[in-house]
Image (spheres, rainbow, N blue to C red):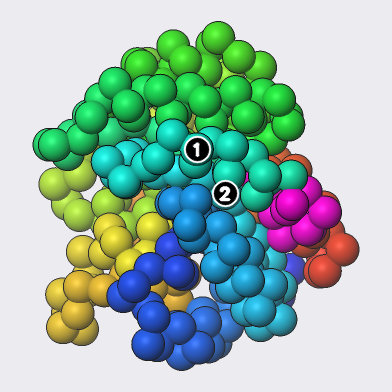
Amino acid sequence: MSENFSWVDTHCHLDAPEFAGTLPQIVANSVEQGVKAILLPAVKVSDCEHVRTLANLYGKKIPGLVYTLGIHPLFINEVKEGDIATLKNQIEKSLIDPRFVGIGEIGLDYFVEGLDHQKQEQFFHAQLDLADEFQLPVVLHVRRSQDAILKALRRRKVPGGIAHAFNGSFQQAEQFIELGFKLGFGGAATYDRALQIRRLLNELPIESIVTETDAPDIPPAWLKEVGTKLNEPAFLPRITRQLASIRGIDEAVFLSAVWRNAMEALPRWSALTTNLFQTPKGL
């Protein structure tokens, strides 16, 4: 791989409990594989300080390591009324940090049972209001909730972002793109049965696609070959190569495009990486 290109993971939970005892090795593995940019999204208000600390600590190893702050819908049953005010304070505190790039992971999850839909919507809308107020892009969780999220986005002037692990319809994808969003693809596309995801990967404009691992979740199909189900950012190069192969595009061209797309989606990330190392040239 040419040194002018870098792997970019737009969604990776380095703060996950699964990595707690091995994080230095997980980071070292990523560095060895040439992963130079990772986005770490917070999932709870109580994690904001930890995420910020990890990004700045391991940013010494991975120069493009950045973070977002938000409340994930899967944790909605733990959320307290004052969490939005706390999140706003954390956002304000982070604005001076060049590694802070947006709000997320936020969204709606209509797949997992037992989650309070009304409370999800209340806190999702409140976080979109923060994104509008601070004019920050958002990293979205959109499982079985694409239409509701699109409706909420149209009510505000949120400056785009990334719809993580996208698995909606082609028409929904087009609507997210029209609103300034890039769409995340990762290990799910490596499964032969993932026909809809592969169709999207093939047919959507290359300018709309970004790469991700969602580590430690969404393990690629081939992980069973190495006897583990735990995903990690070091697997991103192999995942990305397979995505490029599915699309039928040259690896270097694909890599250049998804890097540029990620930086376009999150301008503060672009500012950071431009100062750290040469950004890949356009197509």
User: Please, what secondary structure does the residue beneath circle 1 have?
Assistant: loop
Q: Residue at x 71, y 25 (%)?
A: 133
Q: Is residue 180 magenta?
A: no
Q: Nearer the viewer, residue 133 or 4?
A: 133
The quadrant where residue 181 appears: top right
- Mark 1: few/some/many CA within 10 Å (<14, 14-19, 20+): few
Q: Residue at x 54, y 11 (%)?
A: 154
Q: Nearer the viewer, residue 196 or 58?
A: 58
Residue 33 visible in this rendered orientation of the protein:
no
Residue 189 visible in this rendered orientation of the protein:
yes
Dot label at residue 209: none
Reply above or below: 106 against 237.
above
* Left-right relation of 4 to 87: right
Reply above or below: 254 against 229.
above
The quadrant where residue 233 appears: bottom left
Q: Residue at x 25, y 25 (%)?
A: 117
Q: Could you say where residue 104 lies in the image, as x and y percent from the top left?
A: 52, 43
Camera-nearest label, 2 or 1: 1
Which residue reaches farthest right? 275
Q: Amino acid at mark 1?
A: Gly
Q: Could you say where residue 129 lies in the image, as x and y percent from the top left?
A: 60, 23
Residue indicated by mark 2: 69
Q: Quadrant of the N terminus?
A: bottom right
Q: What span is colored magenta in the figure? A: 93-102
C-alpha span from label 2 to label 1 = 16 Å
Dot label at residue 82: 1
* Left-right relation of 147 to 89: left
Reply above or below: 217 against 161.
below
Q: Could you say where residue 73 lies in the image, as x and y percent from the top left?
A: 34, 39
User: Please, what secondary structure does the residue beneath circle 2 have?
Assistant: strand
Q: Amino acid at mark 2?
A: Leu
Q: Residue at x 78, y 58 (%)?
A: 97
